[in-house]
C-alpha cells in the first residue's frame, strides 16, 4: 500500500527571496518568525516556556541531525533517539528532506527557531524518498515511539483511505497518554479527502491555512454568480477592489489569438501550454500578450486534470519584464465549464487580496465520519520557511507543516503543565482557536477548518478545560430533543463568571444548566428542517472565549440500539413505510465495520468483540430512496476482550490450516450427529 507524504513544493518568487534576505539580521530565528509569532509563540516565550523536557516523535523520512539547527544524534543531541526502519543498522538520517522540514517546524534551535525550540526529537525513518511506505512500518514506528517514551507523536504522512491497522495503532498510543497529531492531507479542496491516520477519531487532525507573509495572497472568481477555486500566480499583486468585467476565451494566449477578438477591459481565460508541440508559452508570455491586448485580468486553466501553482517571475523571463495584470490558475474541469458556458455579456468578478486565515486550496476536507469532526483545527501550512537537508532552509507548503505547528504547541503546554492528559491538551488547543473566513467574509465550514486556526497564546493563557471540545449530536422526527454533558476543569479561578452562548440555526432551541463542574445542554428541533446543521457553543470565562463547534444530524427516521451480552440489537423507525435497512456498526478504536440488513418485523443484531465505543449508521430504504439514521453506544461490560480469529490478518498457509480444521470439525460433527440418530 502506497503512502503519500503531505507536502507541496512551492516555487520561489523574487518577492519571497527578497523578504528572506531582508530578515537575515533579525534576532531570534529567521524563518519561522512569521508563522510562529502569528500563532502566538511570543506569549510562552515571555514566560521562558520553550518545550524543555518534552520528546516529540517524528514518523517520517528521518531527520538530518547534522543540520546546525537540529544538531546531534543521541542523548546529548537534538535528536535523542529513534529508529531507521529502512536500513535497520543505521541511524535515522534523512536523505529526502521532508522529515527534516517537519522537525524544524517543531523544534529547530539555531538560526531557525521552531515552535518549541528546546523540545527533543525522536526520529523514525519509515520512508527513504517520501514517496511511499508500508502500513506495517507506520505501525512499527508508532509502537517504537510508545516504547521510547514519546510525549507527542507527529505523523505528516498517510493514505487517502482508512487503514484499520493504523487506526488501532494510533488508538493504542492514545491509550498510553501520548498526544497524536496527524496531517489532514493535500487532496483538497474536495470534501471527504482525509485518509489514515488523519481520520483517526482520537488524534488531532490538522488542515492548512496561509501564513502571515505577503505570500498569503488569495484569489476569488465568480462567473454568473457561481464561485470557482482559483490560485494567484507567483508575481501577481493584490487588488484594491474587485475586477468586474465580461469574460472572454482567448485560446492559448498567443498574440494571434487577439488579432480579431476584442478583449479590452475583459477578464480573459486561456489554456495552459500550447497547441504547437515543443513551443514554450510561459505564463509571463501569456500575461504580456493578454495585457497588451487591453484585458484587465487573466485566468489560465490546466491542460491536465487538477489545479496548479504557476509563476510569472522565473529565470527565463525577458529582461525588464514585470506583470501588468493579475493572473490566476484554475482546475481544467472548471476552466472548461466556464468556456462552455461563455455567452455574450457573461459577467465575471475577480479579486486578489491578503488573507492569512484562509484555508489553503490543497488542504484536505472532511467529513471522515458522520460521528465526529475532522479536521479539528487548522494551522499555517503555506509558504512555511523551515530547515532543509545539508544545512539549508527552504520554503514549502502542505498540511505536513501545519501539523508540526500543533505538535510544537502541545509541547509548550506540556512543559507548562506536565500533568495534562492528552485529551486535556486537545481541549485547550481546539477551544481557543481564532476564526477563519473565506473570501466573502463567511467563516469556513467545520468540514473545512474544524474549530478554527491555532492560537498558542490563547491556549497558553486558558484557565478552563472543556471536554469534549467538539461534538456531534443526533435527533429525529420521533425524538427531537438531544442532551449533551461537558466536563469542566478549572486550571485557575472559579465558575462564578461563566457564561454560555449559542450560535447556530434559529430553528434549534437551546438551553443549558451548570451543576458543579458539569455543563448540561439541551437542543430541541423546531420544525422539520431535516439535514445536517452546524453551529457553535461559546463559553465565556474570566475574559477568555472557548469555542465548541457542533454538527447536528436531524433525520426523519431513527435507529435504537441496546446491548445484550455480546450482541447489539437494533430497532428501526421511520414516519413513512420502509422496506429495507442496511445497518453498519463501526468500532471507534480502529474504524472496523460490521454490517447487517433487516426488513420490517425482523430482528437485527450484530456481535461485538471488545469494550469500545460503537457508531451505528443505518441506511433506510423508503419509497425507493435512502434515508439515514444514526446512534452511538458505549460497551464496557464484556469480560476484557472477546477474542476472534481475523482471517484477513493471517498468512495464507495459516488460513488454509484453520480452514482445514474447520472443515474436519464440520465432518466430525456430521458423523456424530448421524451416529446418535
Image: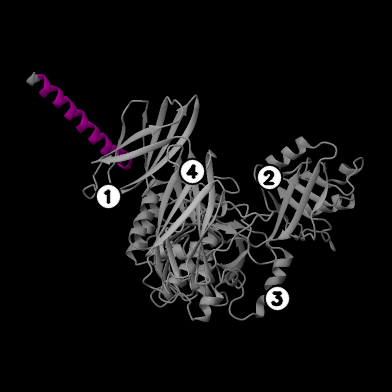
Q: CA distance from mark 2 to mark 3?
A: 35 Å
Instruction: Say left or right for 529 vs 628.
Output: right
Report if the CB atoms under discs 3 and 1 are less than 8 Å apart: no
The answer to whether residue 504 is seen in the rendering is yes
Q: CA distance from mark 4 to mark 3?
A: 51 Å
Residue depicted at x 67% and y 76%? 23
Q: Position of residue 481 (x, y in %)?
A: 44, 45
Q: Position of residue 634 (x, y in %)?
A: 32, 48
Q: CA distance from mark 4 to mark 2?
A: 32 Å
Residue with the mark numbered 4: 553
Residue depicted at x 43% and y 57%? 203
515 or 612, nearer to the observer:
515
Residue with the mark numbered 2: 331
Within 10 Å of disc 1 (Cα), the crowding (few <14, some 14-19, many 20+) is few
Q: In the rendered structure, which disc, 4 or 1, sits on the residue that comes first in sequence?
A: 4
Report if the CB atoms under discs 2 and 3 are less than 8 Å apart: no
578 or 299, nearer to the observer:
578
Residue with the mark numbered 1: 636
Q: What label sits on residue 22 in the rendered view?
A: 3
Q: Position of residue 469 (x, y in %)?
A: 45, 59
Q: Is residue 665 magenta?
A: yes
Q: Which residues are magenta?
A: 647-674
Q: In the rendered structure, which disc, 3 or 1, sits on the residue that comes first in sequence?
A: 3
Amino acid at each position: 500500500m502506497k503512502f503519500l507524504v503531505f507536502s507541496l513544493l512551492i516555487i520561489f518568487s523574487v518577492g519571497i527571496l527578497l523578504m528572506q534576505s531582508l530578515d537575515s539580521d533579525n534576532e531570534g530565528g529567521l524563518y519561522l518568525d512569521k508563522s510562529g509569532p502569528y500563532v502566538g509563540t511570543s506569549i510562552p516565550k515571555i514566560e521562558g516556556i520553550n518545550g524543555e523536557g518534552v520528546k516529540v516523535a517524528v514518523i517520517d523520512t528521518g531527520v538530518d541531525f547534522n543540520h546546525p539547527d537540529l544538531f546531534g544524534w543521541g542523548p546529548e543531541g537534538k535528536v535523542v533517539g529513534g529508529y531507521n526502519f529502512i536500513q535497520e543498522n543505521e541511524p535515522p538520517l534523512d536523505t529526502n528532506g521532508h522529515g527534516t522540514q517537519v522537525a524544524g517546524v517543531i523544534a529547530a534551535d539555531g538560526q531557525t527557531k521552531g515552535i518549541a525550540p528546546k523540545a527533543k526529537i525522536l526520529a523514525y525513518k519509515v520512508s527513504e524518498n517520501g514517496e511511499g511506505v508500508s502500513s506495517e512500518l507506520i505501525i512499527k514506528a508508532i509502537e517504537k515511539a510508545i516504547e521510547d517514551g514519546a510525549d507527542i507523536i507527529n505523523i505528516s504522512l498517510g493514505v487517502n483511505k482508512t487503514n484499520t491497522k493504523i487506526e488501532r495503532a494510533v488508538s493504542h498510543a492514545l491509550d498510553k497518554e501520548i498526544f497524536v497529531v496527524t496531517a489532514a492531507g493535500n487532496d483538497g479542496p474536495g470534501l471527504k479527502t482525509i485518509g489514515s491516520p488523519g481520520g483517526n477519531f482520537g488524534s488531532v487532525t490538522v488542515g492548512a491555512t496561509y501564513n502571515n507573509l505577503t505570500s498569503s495572497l488569495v484569489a476569488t472568481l465568480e462567473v454568473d454568480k457561481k464561485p470557482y477555486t482559483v490560485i494567484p500566480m507567483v508575481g501577481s499583486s493584490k487588488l484594491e477592489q474587485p475586477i468586474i468585467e465580461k469574460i472572454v476565451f482567448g485560446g492559448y494566449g498567443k498574440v494571434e489569438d487577439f488579432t480579431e477578438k476584442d478583449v479590452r477591459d475583459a477578464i480573459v481565460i486561456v489554456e495552459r501550454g500550447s497547441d504547437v508541440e515543443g513551443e514554450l508559452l510561459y505564463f509571463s508570455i501569456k500575461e504580456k500578450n493578454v495585457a497588451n491586448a487591453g484585458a484587465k485580468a487573466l485566468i489560465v486553466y490546466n491542460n491536465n486534470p487538477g489545479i496548479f501553482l504557476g509563476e510569472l517571475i522565473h529565470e527565463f523571463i525577458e529582461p525588464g519584464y514585470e506583470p501588468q495584470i493579475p493572473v490566476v490558475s484554475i482546475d481544467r474541469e472548471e476552466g472548461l465549464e466556464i468556456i462552455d458556458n461563455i455567452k455574450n455579456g457573461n459577467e465575471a468578478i475577480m479579486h486578489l487580496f491578503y488573507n492569512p486565515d484562509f484555508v489553503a486550496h490543497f488542504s484536505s476536507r472532511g467529513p471522515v465520519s458522520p460521528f465526529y469532526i475532522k479536521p479539528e483545527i487548522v494551522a499555517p501550512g503555506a509558504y512555511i520557511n523551515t530547515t532543509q537537508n545539508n544545512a539549508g532552509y527552504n520554503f514549502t507548503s502542505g498540511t505536513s507543516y501545519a501539523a508540526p505547528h500543533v505538535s510544537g504547541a502541545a509541547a509548550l503546554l506540556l512543559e507548562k503543565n506536565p500533568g495534562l492528559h492528552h485529551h486535556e491538551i486537545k481541549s485547550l488547543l481546539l477551544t481557543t482557536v481564532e476564526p477563519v473566513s473565506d473570501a466573502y467574509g463567511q467563516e469556513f465550514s467545520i468540514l473545512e477548518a474544524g474549530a478554527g486556526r491555532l492560537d498558542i497564546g490563547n491556549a497558553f493563557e486558558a484557565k478552563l478545560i472543556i471536554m469534549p471540545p467538539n461534538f456531534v449530536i443526533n435527533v429525529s422526527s420521533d425524538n427531537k430533543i438531544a442532551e449533551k454533558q461537558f466536563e469542566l476543569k478549572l486550571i485557575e479561578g472559579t465558575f462564578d463568571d461563566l457564561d454560555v452562548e449559542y450560535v447556530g440555526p434559529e430553528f434549534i432551541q437551546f438551553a443549558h444548566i451548570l451543576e458543579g463542574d458539569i455543563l448540561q445542554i439541551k437542543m430541541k428541533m423546531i420544525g422539520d428542517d431535516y439535514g445536517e446543521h452546524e453551529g457553535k457553543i461559546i463559553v465565556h470565562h474570566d475574559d477568555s472565549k472557548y469555542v465548541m463547534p457542533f454538527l447536528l444530524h436531524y433525520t426523519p427516521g431513527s435507529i435504537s440500539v441496546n446491548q445484550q451480552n455480546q450482541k447489539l440489537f437494533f430497532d428501526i423507525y421511520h414516519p413513512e413505510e420502509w422496506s429495507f435497512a442496511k445497518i453498519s456498526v463501526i468500532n471507534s478504536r480502529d474504524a472496523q465495520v460490521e454490517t447487517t440488513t433487516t426488513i420490517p418485523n425482523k430482528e437485527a443484531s450484530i456481535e461485538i468483540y471488545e469494550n469500545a465505543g460503537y457508531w451505528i449508521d443505518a441506511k433506510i430504504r423508503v419509497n425507493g430512496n435512502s434515508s439515514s439514521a444514526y446512534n452511538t453506544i458505549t460497551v464496557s461490560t464484556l469480560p476484557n476482550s472477546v477474542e476472534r480469529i481475523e482471517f484477513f490478518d493471517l498468512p495464507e498457509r495459516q488460513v488454509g490450516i484453520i480452514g482445514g480444521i474447520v472443515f474436519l470439525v464440520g465432518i466430525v460433527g456430521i458423523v456424530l450427529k448421524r451416529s446418535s440418530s
